[in-house]
Image (cartoon, rainbow, N blue to C red):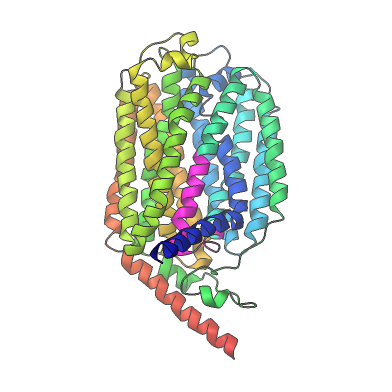
Amino acid sequence: MLKSKKKEKKDSDKISFYQILKKSWPCFGSYLSYAFTLTVLYVNLIIISKIIWPSDAFASHSSELGFLFGISSYVMAFSGLIFGRLADTLSRVKLFAFSTLFFGLGFIINGFAPEGLETITYLFFLISTLIRGFFSGGFWPLINSYISDTSLEEEKSQFFGVLNSLFQLFQLTGMIIVAILFQFGFWRFYFLFIGSIIMIIGIIIFKANEPKRASTREELVDIIGKNGVKYEYKLNKETLKETILKPTNIIAFAEGIFTTILLSVPDFLLVAYIQSPPHNLSSTSTALFMMIFGIPGSIFGSIVFAKLSDKLAKRNIKNRIYMIIISMIGLFIIFIIVFILPLPSFTPEEGNNMLNLLTFPVFWSMGLAAFGARSILGLYNINQPPLLQRINLPEAQGLISSVNQFLESIGYGTGTILAGVLLAFFNNNYQITVILTMTIGIIGVFLWITSTKWIEEDALRISNILQDRGNEISSKNKS
């Protein structure tokens, strides 16, 4: 009898997982398209530098390339505010389709960039990157708004765990494909082909179903689930002051800037570090390295941490904060170690031979670091969104995630620009640049520690408001 009950519970969890996947496919369609193309600039930094400035070394244009990444993040930050507000009032499905469609268009335009014309080529890459940055800015606010109405509280980390795992899988798979294509000169084909596929995905998303707002909140699930019953509350000055302008939200906004500085520096500098002389790893070797060690790490992290996060959060919401803190400290330590490992010097031919690279013990140390980083990165990604959803009203989910994304994108852009400038200032000393910039990012840890003082009070406030609204909705429908 006991075995039978355990089996029923296991089957229930399995059904719940697949239902989340089924109901949330527009999120996966848009966000995984973004993931698949995310590394196109990072992994090909040296090659793109040669496409734009064929006669110059990367070091002489590190600040311009840093600006290319940074300004894209700034545009993404501002567009997220627009899409976030629209997500709380308009159809999320149509917004998903619209943003995905034009995100793909940004790639197609990039495919027509002339090669080797320096300023003209750079402007082509810049404009195309800005278009992609603007429309990809809508993905995260839309996902948070959509998921808040399709997943129950005890499912949210599982959803974000699946999303994070697939995101990293698609990101690393896209990395190896784009690295091979760029290395063999097919960069124009990549932009045109991938852009066309993404535009088709955007058209398909138009056919998805729009979920009912607030239909999965524990306080309202039995009420909003009934036919004809709708959650029609809108955000106003009173609810803005009463819920959004509270300590945990404000701290989460502030920490986003510092956290993403910590995360952006390795993204921007690590590839340039291992691909530049004297290390000379090729983009293909870089991508293969991340696939061998990074994908298993991301899958392991999501499987192990997703259900554990939901379980611990059910006991106490503070546990989500503790897991975020562990993730940030772990990433800080790992990336500092990576940049001080004694990486050997290679010729370009040796750097393109992955089997040769794996004969060096230091690369297995780097692989272990990549596995660990990808694993614990999931702790942040699967705990921060449910935490913010818990302490905000259904009609504010898009706004909250967009404001948070705005500040995170500002931090990310600032991190890449700062890293590029410091790298040039310290004459290509990657170690000093990494230590200085990532130390700024660790401030986010102290802000999260401070938030434990108010998180329970802020969560209870939202729960009480929704209980009152549930009673109000029930009374209206009875009369």
- The residue drawn where x is 58% and y is 37% is 36
Q: Seen from this angle, which residue lies furthest front?
A: 1
Foreground: 64 or 101?
101
Is residue 151 found inside the magenta-colored segment of the image?
A: yes
Residue 232, compared with residue 24, is above or below; it is below
Q: Is residue 322 above or below residue 441?
A: below
Quadrant that contains the C terminus: bottom right
State the image coordinates of residue 224 (x, y, percent, origin top left): 56, 75
Q: Residue at x 34, y 29 (%)?
A: 434
Residue 213 located left or right of residue 108: left
How many labels sit on residues?
0
Secondary structure character of the magenta stretch overall: helix
Residue 19, picture quadrant: bottom right
Q: Is residue 406 visible?
A: no
Taking the magenta stretch, the answer to whether it contains residue 121 is: no
Q: Identify the residue at horizontal 36%, vertical 44% (top origin).
A: 258
Q: Is residue 149 left or right of residue 347?
A: right
Residue at the spot 43% in from the left edge and 51% down from the top edge: 382
Q: Quadrant of residue 124?
A: top right
Residue 219: x %, y % from top left: 46, 74
Q: Quadrant of the N terminus?
A: bottom left
> What segment carries the magenta color?
146-168
Q: In x, y percent, where is residue 197?
A: 70, 38
Judging depth in this view, the residue of 106 and 479 nearest the camera is 479
